[in-house]
Image (cartoon, rainbow, N blue to C red):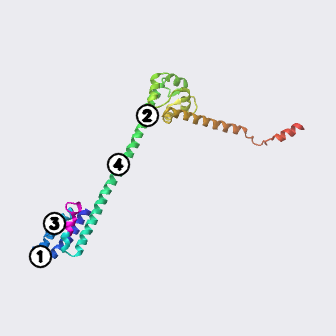
Amino acid sequence: VVLLVLFFMFGISLTTGTLEHLNTTDRWAEEENKLLILYFASLDRSILNLYMAMLGGRDWGEYYDALMVLPLMYRLIFMMFLSFAILAVVNIVTGIFVENAIQCHHTDRNSVVQEELQSKEAYKDRMRSVFEEMDEDDTGCLTLEEFEAKLDDERVIAYFDTLKLDVSDARKLFTLLDFDQSGQVELDEFMNGCLKLKGESRALDLAMIMYEMEWMVQAIAHVCQQMQPQDGAAPTSRVDTKLSTGS
């Protein structure tokens, strides 16, 4: 729309200037006006040639030479048209490419997020199937005995390997999955734990280290709490103990 208005406005200006210059029959017959008549004697010709000048269909220098018989103002109008048209086209094309790039990036990002969510759900479904296969008594919980017994099955080990879970130490893995330390692993614990431990074998070792550190922090906190004096009892120092012994 902007380009159409631009063609129409500048076409009218150049056509008007041309017709004002060709105000006599003799000027229509003059040799120096032939190119001006050919390019700008009517509105449709002016618009067509402006379009060709913008897109390189004909060298814009030829149109500039044809306008030499008109006052300087019309040559300036022609140069203004070229400047506006080229800038408009560049901006429009650039805007289209930028918008397409943004849309593609947004689409790619949404696709990656969607694929990740689908992969996570598929992984949970597979782990649910493994849990149901290991839970033979349908109690909804796995004991250490059940867990170790099932990990003796080569099929189960192979299935865990395909899910990138290291099950070389069943007791260690069961300890990490048993978050509430109840001695039983429920379905939610099993699925969430497997998601956290998913990866290479070093992921299991790292999780075990974190578990042991958390256990140590809790043990130290418990010892500190036990060492605190009871309410109303004044702490005794070594000096007081020696004095009382000496007396």
Three-letter code for the amino acid on which mark 4 is drawn: Cys
Place residue 59 in its image quadrant: bottom left
Q: Which of marks 4 and 3 is nearer the N terminus?
A: 3
Residue 29, compared with residue 205, is above or below; it is below
Inter-mark Cα distance, 4 to 2: 28 Å
> Residue 56, can we see it?
yes
Inter-mark Cα distance, 1 to 4: 58 Å
What quarter of the picture does the C terminus occupy? Answer: top right
Inter-mark Cα distance, 1 to 3: 19 Å
What quarter of the picture does the N terminus occupy? Answer: bottom left
Inter-mark Cα distance, 2 to 1: 86 Å
Residue behind mark 2: 123
User: Which residues make up the magenta segment?
Assistant: 53-64
Which SS class for mark 3? helix
Q: Between tags 4 and 2, which lies in front?
A: 4
Residue 172 point in image, percent of width and height: 56, 29
Residue behind mark 1: 27
Residue behind mark 3: 45
Three-letter code for the amino acid on which mark 3 is drawn: Arg
